[in-house]
Amino acid sequence: MPSLMTPPSTSRIQVRPAAEREGRKDYISIRDYGFWYGQKKALEAISLDIPERQVVAFIGPSGCGKSTLLRNLNRMNDLVDGIRHEGDITINGRSIYDPGLEVISLRRRVGMVFQKSNPFPKSIFENVVYALRVVGVRDRALLEEACETSLRKAALWDEVKDRLDDSALGLSGGQMQRLCIARAIANRPEILLMDEPCSALDPIATGKIEELIHELKEQFTIVIVTHSMQQAARVSDRTAFFYLGKQIEYDTTEKIFMNPSQAQTEAYISGRFG
Amino acid sequence: MSAPSDSSTPRGEAWVWFSGLGLIVGLGMVIGLLSLVFLNGATVFWAPPVPVAQLDDGRTLIGQLAQRRIRAGSPADQPKYERQYQVGLRELNGNSYLWVDEARIKAETFPADILGLERVENGPAFVRPQSLRRSDGQVVAIAEPAFEVAFQAEVAAASAVREKLVEITRHRIGDVNAAMEQSRVGLRRAEDLKLADEIAARKAEIAVLDERYALLQAEAAKVTAGGAVASLTAQDAAGREVVVPLTQVIRAWFPNRLDTWGRVKLYGSRLAEFIFDEPREANTEGGLMPAIFGTLVMTVFMSLLVTPFGVITAIYLREYAQQGPLLRIVRISVNNLAGVPSIVFGVFGLGFFVYVLGGSIDQLFFADQLKYNNNTPVFGTGGLLWCSLTLALMTLPVVIVATEEALAAVPRGMREASLATGASKWQTIRDILLPASAPGILTGVILAMARGAGEVAPLMLVGVVKLAPSLPFDGSFPFLHMDRKFMHLGFHVYDLGFQSPDSDAARPMVFATTLLLIILVVCLNLGAIWIRNRLRARFKGASF
Ligand SMILES: Nc1ncnc2c1ncn2[C@@H]1O[C@H](COP(=O)(O)OP(=O)(O)OP(=O)(O)O)[C@@H](O)[C@H]1O
Ligand SMILES: [Mg+2]
């Protein structure tokens, strides 16, 4: 894949046309959302709809709040002390802040892949089936089946099928990241959040994960944070550009990259700042 | 002064030497201490040749050289030495050890007929044997060629008699006594409650036991009489006649005739006795098995108690408690607990565990025992359980701090990954955090064990005794008797060194016991470290 080894310059960005599949247009809906870490306002007046079974990319300069927004979609930020939010986020019509909704069940429906791969110090098998063990699945056959499907989807099966009982910490960095993806999709969440999943990977591993995203979007709604314009262009259907905690522009990827309506977006994409 | 920039050694370099010096001093002290204990402790059981020394006042002594030192007040350039001999025969000499000015020794010879005896009472003896009276009454003189074979055979036979006696008096009569005790308590209770049937039953029980007791006594008397015939007639250094009944002899050897292999065998047999037998002669002789066992069991129990306690506390403090000033105060208090003198824990253990907890247990479950057995407490007195609990409390801060640090050191990503898959907090702690921090927790347990195994002061208050009549573990239900008092190596060292009537005789044992205690602690720690390394290996990754 020579094109992957030498990333194309911005002028040659190839844009995938937005494939409009049927599904709810406002599957994830963020409304007038603001968020504070203590006194510090990290997000301001975010409003965007993420359609079902599409890939949405969040781009923007470092510190603009992409991770913060992403981590709020499965309420990972609840771990941080002194946080506060305004506005609302709904998934399939239901607010994630609904007091009747358990955070745990929300997280079971919204899987997450982190920037830094974080496998558990357990065997490869146990890593993949962790989410199933957590909900109490004991049946060995079921676990094995889930392990194989997830690993196949994460394009890791062939590399690890003979060493499922080895420690996951013995894998390479890229394999670990794919293992984390397999782990995140093992319990078939509806939404997959990915925070710079390829930032520590070489172009070949990156390519594998991008292919994976294409396949996964048949079943999952995917939100991906990325610093690579090429990647955003290659994998996403829609792109949101943030700057200093504000949502500057949100549109189809084609529109954002070919014909942005905001000057800031244009400047960021063409590499003039950020 | 010239500019520091062109000097060949950077300015901070002096500190390297300084800190290196600190290391050397520290290492030197540790190595010095260990080698002192090792040299003194490991040579206790070695049997050197035993001289006959002629003194200038015409006296003669037979004895094993124990120490040699410079006489107090002798000039430094021409030091004068004095020697300490272990002459044994305490019943005749009044003392087992004798200091002699080296200048007064006229001649030293090593005659082959010197016999060393280890005896059940009155310590060792070094004598010149004359004749042997065998158990069939026949007398064999030293000159006869059959003497030595006959002698060793008789010693072995006498040992068998002694063991049989121990079996009868200690174990079988002991069992009868224990049963009798129970029956008497039952009888008193029945009389108090006027239960005619039970009174009769208990009385019958007691009659049976009385009969069994009398039988055992008769058997013991018979065995004793049978063993009383064989004896050794010998002369001490001054030519006085000494008659030693062979049942008194534990071991006999000819120190000046033994080859190296013989000495090694003797060493091995003494070492085995030291480790596997029970103490004799106010603990200055015999073995340390009860103390070794007590120390081990107590330390293991302490670890089993302190680990879950400490880990649960640390999990609460770290994962569940609301972080804030109150928690800070709790943490500071926990840390300060580590600095409280151990004797204070002993006092607390006595006041709370023994009197309050133990007292309540007795009131609740052993009320009959208390009422009908002269208020003899069961748990309301010092014992293994209270010792383990007291030391567990004392070492709790170590485990809490280690666990908290281990939990904090688990990468945040791992915790987030687990929560992100929909695991609950408790599942995350159980499945991810605890396994990942197990090596760190074990480090804390190792430190706690090291501190606990060497602790003596608090134990003296809550259940360690100089001489325990029985081990905390035996064949009778419930097999492990947590209420029993027990012996402990650390206390043994204190007791030998400072409480024993004959401190010279106790000296070698102090070193041997200390060495044993050190070895025991090292072994316990090595065991825990081995477990920790196995855990570590499981969590170690090839990449990153
Ligand atoms: N736990 C936290 N506590 C306080 N402030 C935080 C915390 N996490 C993030 N922030 C702040 O919130 C802002 C947004 O951070 P965020 O991590 O969302 O940025 P980002 O867009 O993901 O940046 P990057 O591309 O570098 O990952 C930053 O200014 C950051 O300093
Ligand atoms: Mg980020």
Image: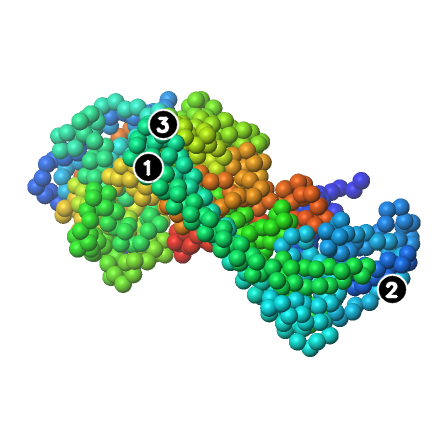
Q: Nearer the viewer, mark 2 or mark 3?
A: 3
Disc 1 secondary structure class: helix
Residue indicated by mark 1 = B200
Instruction: Please rate how many residues cluster around mark 2, counting C-alpha atoms within 10 Å: few if below 14, some from 14 to 19, many from 20.
Output: few
Q: Nearer the viewer, residue B543 or B492?
A: B492
Residue B107, labelled with which disc?
2
Instruction: Please rate how many residues cluster around mark 3, counting C-alpha atoms within 10 Å: few if below 14, some from 14 to 19, many from 20.
Output: few
Q: Nearer the viewer, residue A131 or A195?
A: A131
Pick whichever of labels 2 and 3 is earlier in the sequence: 2
Mark pair 1, 3: CA separation: 13 Å
The amino acid type found where label 2 is placed reads Ala
The answer for which chain carries disc 3 is B
Relative to residue A23, is residue A3 drawn left or right?
right
The amino acid type found where label 3 is placed reads Asp
Same chain, labels 1 and 2: yes
Q: Nearer the viewer, mark 1 or mark 3?
A: 1
